């Protein structure tokens, strides 16, 4: 009888292990990474991975390697940092989801990230070079950068907010659905940022704007974009920004 409490604890742990596969059946983000693999370099809380071709979720831990096709979900009140082959860092907020495909370790050295919904922070290595690309896209735009720090919030209504902290990026509207190798569920509902002022809009059909240090651009759900504007440190600051700035200083 003295083993009964231990049995129930093990049974509860097993249920916790198996449950995420059903409860996380929502649309993930997509990260393209190469055969060198991405490495989990920091994890606050918990995250789980569904390896390509498998049906069982596994708990993710620091120093774990992520391979092409792996699907990852970051738990509530959790944060995840991934280091790519060129030493660029990608960080994801709670309830973010993504699929690893290629991380720049292949011959081309390109890194591409597609975000359906969620928050990501990118610290892009200056070693990317002129012949290599680092792109983060959402449903209505693609951001192209080399050696900079910025973040992108992709909202459940397909709108998005991009803020640049160092360097500059080119943000281009997309006129067709992003390519995807997997069928995904509905997006995760998350609260969006406060309404961004700015009446200027750019046509959805074809547009590219340059967003420089301490500027932002807001992309509307219909694919049009406001004119880039400056933002202040005060309006930008929150726990997510403070944590990422702390991690960047540690680099």
Image (spheres, rainbow, N blue to C red):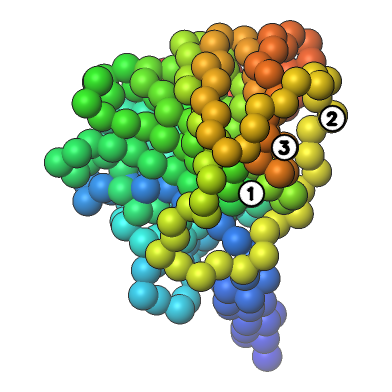
Q: Which mark is residue 220?
A: 3
Query: 217 or 74: which is nearer to us?
Result: 217
- As measured in the structure, the alpha-carbon distance from the residue carrying label 1 to the one carrying label 2 is 17 Å
Image side of residue 192 versus residue 205, left or right: right
Left or right: 42 as drawn, with respect to 74: left
* Residue reaching furthest to the bottom: 1
* Vertical relation: 60 (above or below) 53: above
Sequence-earlier tag: 1 or 3: 1
Screen quadrant of the C terminus: top left
Badge 3 element: loop
Q: Single out the residue that lies furthest toward the left.
A: 107
Q: What numbered label is drawn on residue 117? A: 1
For the point 65% across and 23% down, the residue is 217
Tag 2 residue: 194
Local SS, label 2: loop
Q: Secondary structure at mark 1?
A: loop
Q: Earlier in the sequence, mark 1 or mark 2?
A: 1
In x, y percent, where is residue 77?
70, 46
């Amino acid at each position: 009888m003295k083993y009964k409490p231990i049995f129930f604890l093990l049974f509860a742990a097993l249920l916790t292990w198996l449950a995420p596969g059903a409860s996380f059946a929502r649309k993930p983000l997509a990260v393209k990474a190469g055969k060198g693999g991405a490495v989990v370099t920091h994890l606050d809380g918990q995250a789980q991975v569904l390896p390509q071709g498998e049906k069982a979720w596994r708990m993710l831990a620091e120093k774990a390697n992520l391979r092409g096709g792996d699907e990852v979900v970051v738990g509530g009140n959790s944060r995840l940092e991934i280091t790519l082959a060129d030493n660029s860092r990608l960080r994801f907020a709670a309830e973010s989801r993504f699929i690893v495909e290629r991380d720049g370790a292949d011959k081309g050295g390109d890194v591409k990230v597609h975000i359906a919904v969620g928050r990501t922070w990118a610290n892009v290595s200056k070693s990317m070079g002129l012949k290599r690309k680092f792109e983060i896209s959402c449903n209505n735009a693609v951001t192209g950068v080399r050696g900079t720090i910025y973040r992108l919030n992709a909202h459940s209504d397909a709108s998005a907010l991009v803020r640049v902290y160092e360097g500059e990026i080119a943000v281009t509207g997309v006129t067709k659905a992003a390519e995807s190798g997997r069928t995904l569920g509905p997006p995760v509902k998350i609260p969006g940022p406060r309404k961004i002022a700015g009446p200027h809009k750019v046509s959805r059909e074809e547009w590219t704007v340059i967003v420089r240090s301490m500027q932002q651009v807001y992309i509307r759900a219909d694919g049009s974009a406001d004119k880039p504007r400056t933002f202040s440190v005060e309006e930008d600051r929150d726990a997510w920004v403070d944590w990422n700035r702390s991690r960047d200083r540690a680099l």
